[in-house]
Amino acid sequence: MIRDRTEQLSEWLHENYSFLYAYLVKLTLHPAEAEDLAQDTVLRCIERFSQYRPEKASFSTWMIQIATNLWLDKKRRKKREQTYLNKQQLEWHLGDELGIEVADALRTLKDHHRIPVILKYTYGYSYEEIAHICGVSIGTIKSRLHHAMANLRKELGEDEGQNGRKTDQRSSGI
């Protein structure tokens, strides 16, 4: 039975590693830091696999929750401003999924707004899953997403039009 659980964990980690790394690159905007956090997350998943409850969340949701918490803990401990990639490196790592303007706009968001935006609009997580990952209520996630999207629209140049309707001055996709 222990061998079966070990094999299952190994399989899930292998299946989800590239997803984990891609999420962390988007979250940290720094590939080396993302790689370190991905390795720390894998170790934490191994250490705490006995605490994983599949009836509460999928493995990938549980793993992303661990990764998010590790990242937030690291930021709190270091109390330093994160350094970002220059535009060419950022564009190369984010590719077509996020345009450089959107990445720059995301960078302006506070962590508690940026994390739900990435989880919802890049990975398609439900409000419930995001609330579970972030450890807050669904209503809080909806509120954070609403405020984050308003800030992103402002950053991306979407203004009030003549009729009071919003108009997009750039083709941002958000």
Image (spheres, rainbow, N blue to C red):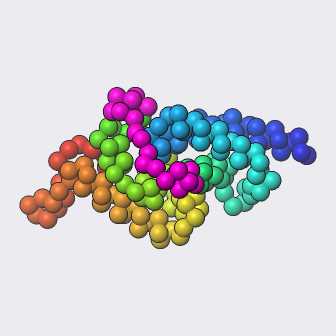
Up-down relation of residue 95 to residue 41 (above or below): above
Q: Is residue 93 above or below residue 164?
A: above
Single out the residue that lies furthest toward the left.
Answer: 162
Q: Report the residue at 88% width, 40% height from top.
A: 3
Work out whether 87 lies above or below 135. Answer: above
Where is 95 relative to 162, above or below? above
Q: Percent from the top left, x then y, of residue 158?
A: 21, 53
Residue 103 in percent (x, y) is at 35, 42
Left/right placement of residue 153 relative to residue 18 reads left
Residue at 46% across / 50% down in the picture? 80
| Residues in magenta, as a range | 72-93
Where residue 64 appears, as percent x and y from the top left, is 60, 49
Q: Residue shown at 37%/54% (left/top)?
A: 109
Q: Position of residue 74 (x, y in %)?
A: 56, 50
Image side of residue 112 versus residue 69, left or right:
left
Could one spot residue 95 in this view of the protein? no
Which residue sits furthest right? 1
Using the rendered view, name the quadrant where residue 53 is placed: bottom right
Q: Is residue 157 visible?
A: yes
Describe residue 61's horizontal placement relative to residue 82 as left or right.
right
